[in-house]
Image (spheres, helix red, strand yellow):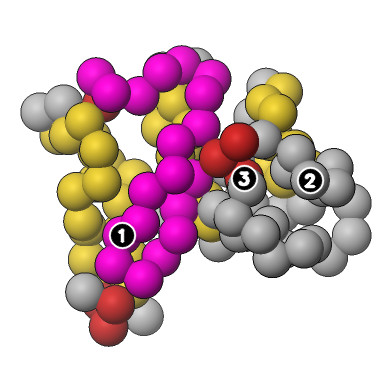
Amino acid sequence: METVFVRVARLADLTEQRGVRVVARECEIALWYVQGRVFAVGDVCAHQHVPTIHEGILNGLTVTCPRHGWTYSLESGKALEGDGRLPVYPVKVEKGEVFVAVPAEDV
């Protein structure tokens, strides 16, 4: 599937270890700035289908949904237990701007 990078934030507006909700066209995304890296995963929890991942509890490179406790890897999007998975979006930072790759048909 072809993707296109879309600007979603300024790096200066992200706070270390705090999630931010952004929408890149139709994609609801949770951005996390952790250990000097920006991660982008789907904001909608695979368990209850509620956009709460940006409000989650961070532990290293995992985030736990505040609603029902499902924990996901920021690197792979995979739930640590069960079959749940969040979409993971490629990120690039250029000149202080954060871009996330979304499917081309959504652009």
- Side of 11 where 55 appears, left or right: right
Residue at 45%, 53% (x, y): give it.
Answer: 29
Instruction: Look at label 1 and name its amino acid.
Output: Ala
Residue at 61%, 36% (x, y): give it.
Answer: 55
Alpha-carbon neighbours of circle 3 within 10 Å: few (<14), some, or many (≥20)? many
Boundaries of the magenta span: 12-30
Q: Secondary structure at mark 1?
A: strand
* Separation (CA) of disc 1 from disc 3: 16 Å
Please report contact status of discs 2 and 3: CB closer than 8 Å, yes or no. no
Q: Which residue matches tag 3? A: 53
* Separation (CA) of disc 2 from disc 3: 9 Å
Instruction: Look at label 2 and name its amino acid.
Output: Arg
Residue at 25%, 46% (x, y): give it.
Answer: 8
Label placed on residue 67: 2
* Separation (CA) of disc 1 from disc 2: 24 Å
Residue 38 in the image: x percent, y percent? 40, 32
- Side of 13 where 72 appears, left or right: right
Which badge, 2 or 3, is on the more N-terminal residue?
3
Alpha-carbon neighbours of circle 2 within 10 Å: few (<14), some, or many (≥20)? some
Residue 13 is one of the magenta-drawn residues: yes
Label total for image: 3
Query: Which quarter of the figure is the C terminus placed in?
Result: bottom left
User: Height in image: 68 above or below 106?
Assistant: above
* Direction right: furthest residue: 81
Instruction: Look at label 3 and name its amino acid.
Output: Ile
Residue 88 in the image: x percent, y percent? 51, 55
Residue 22 in the image: x percent, y percent? 37, 48
Query: Which quarter of the figure is the N terminus placed in?
Result: bottom left
User: Height in image: 79 above or below 93?
Assistant: below
Label placed on residue 24: 1
Q: Nearer the viewer, residue 69 or 38?
A: 69
